Image (cartoon, helix red, strand yellow):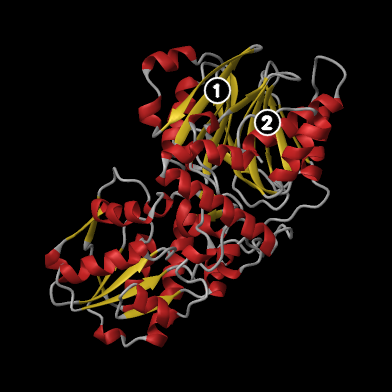
Amino acid sequence: MCGIVGVVATGPVNQLLYDSLQLLQHRGQDAAGIATGSGSTFSMWKGSGMVREIFRTRNMRNLTGNVGIAHVRYPTAGSAFSVEEAQPFYVNAPFGITLGHNGNLTNAEQLKSEMFRIDRRHINTNSDSEILLNVLAHELQEGTSSYTLDPATIFRAVAALHRRVRGAYACVAHIADHGIVAFRDPYGIRPLVYGVNETDAGTEYLVASESVALEGLGFKFVRDVAPGEAIFIDIDGNFYSQQCAETATLNPCIFEYVYFARPDSVMNGVSVYSSRLKMGEYLAEKIRKQLRTGDIDVVMPIPDTSRPAAMQLSARLGLEFREGFFKNRYVGRTFIMPGQAVRKRSVRQKLSALPTEFKGKNVLLVDDSIVRGTTSREIVNMAREAGANKVIFASAAPPVRYPNVYGIDMPTRSELIAHGRSDDEIQRLIEADGLVYQDIDAMKRSVSELGPHLTSFEASCFDGNYVTGDITPEYLDRLEAARELVAIAESDPYSQLNLNLAQAD
């Protein structure tokens, strides 16, 4: 999962882009980058770590121009990170283009081969975002014989890209001396929105992964970019849009609503916060059917994502809501962190339990999801150590049984605690006294009831249905083999050279 931003403004955009990344920091803490443009000249700065760690005053001064894009990154499936893979990426031909990408290309290896054999373009990293940039650059070059571009040529290039590329992708690209082009894959898996800011000097445009980046900077939300659609804002602030896919359907990633997106975002016309409240309502009904609610003394959320669901659940069941865990906000998300030992240690660093809220009580803990189970087991043990009598665990999402291949760094099948296991087996593994999962249909209704136009979702990590239709068991096997190579590299720095050779093979 990543966060992307593109801006066409009436004045310098460096501060706007920096502030946008701060608002999207939850979408990636691995790396960040900003690229701006003044005429035909780009300025860029990027690095690994948090936004506030990467950019200094001297860097910001060098990011000149009224047009630019920015990116926050966390790694996608099977990727080993080096600073060269921080985004945006840049290519100098045909016009000079920078690009930031959120998602994952499922036919990246095929495209990389085509780049070398047919398009005669060199790919310098293992990032599928660099592949996507070169596909766009090639199609722009094929579509024009002059030194200028018009919107029709840009939209034809995006249409050709849609025909070649498979997977999930929401993109912003800056074409030197022309403007910003943004587009979304024909399935609408990854989110993308845009807004405007009216100034005395003219209209400013901001494109971003989430609406919070617009509202936090004073931009008025206009709408989501439609699946398969491309928008183009030229350097004079003129706006153009066109549907570029032959067929397009909206299948938003439901994990955005469960976990990734900020609760104050609106995605595809649905409030993330409201959808999480709904998940709490449906989970309460299932708990009422499965458990003796009179035996539960208190409901507690695992901060922070699960708080809306836990609050609504407690209200529906008439149970007391209390905060028993407190979060250290300076520790990253644990299921993103590499290595089982690191994740286990990080749980204790990230959360602390307040014994007075646990002692002698039967506690119902509510979390947004259970992925590997490491975090859940540690939290259950922390609750017991704090004095809880019984610890029941509830998940606002269904069991995560399958890998995600569309831009979420979801573990392999063998690492997923729910893969091939029953609820009773999972309960024993996380050492809880009870376990209740949300139903898949209830999770989907939590969103679709708020947005009746949403009739289909990308929910493959829960139901195993991959909407792009090109994911085979062999593909998943290759993906897991790549992850194993990455794990070796992370545990043994001397294996990095072998990893690079293996991935380049």
Q: Secondary structure at mark 1?
A: strand
- Which tag, 1 or 2, sits closer to the chain's start? 1
Percent from the top left, x then y, of residue 251?
66, 58
Percent from the top left, x then y, of residue 94?
76, 20
Position of the C terminus by quadrant: top right
Tell which residue pokes out farthest to the right in this image: 145
Q: Residues within 10 Å of mark 1 (few under 14, many from 20)?
A: many
Q: CA distance from mark 1 to mark 2?
A: 20 Å
Percent from the top left, x then y, of residue 426?
41, 76
Q: Give, as a three-letter code, the residue at label 2.
A: Ile
Write the residue at 83% across / 29% down.
152
Q: Which mark's residue is nearer the viewer, 1 or 2?
A: 2
Return the residue nearer the eye: 99 or 215.
99
Residue 244 badge: none
Residue 123 badge: 2
The answer to whether residue 452 is above or below residue 437 is above
Percent from the top left, x then y, of residue 73?
49, 39
Q: Is residue 171 visible?
A: yes
Q: Give, as a three-letter code, the residue at label 1.
A: Ala
Write the residue at 24% across / 51% down.
349
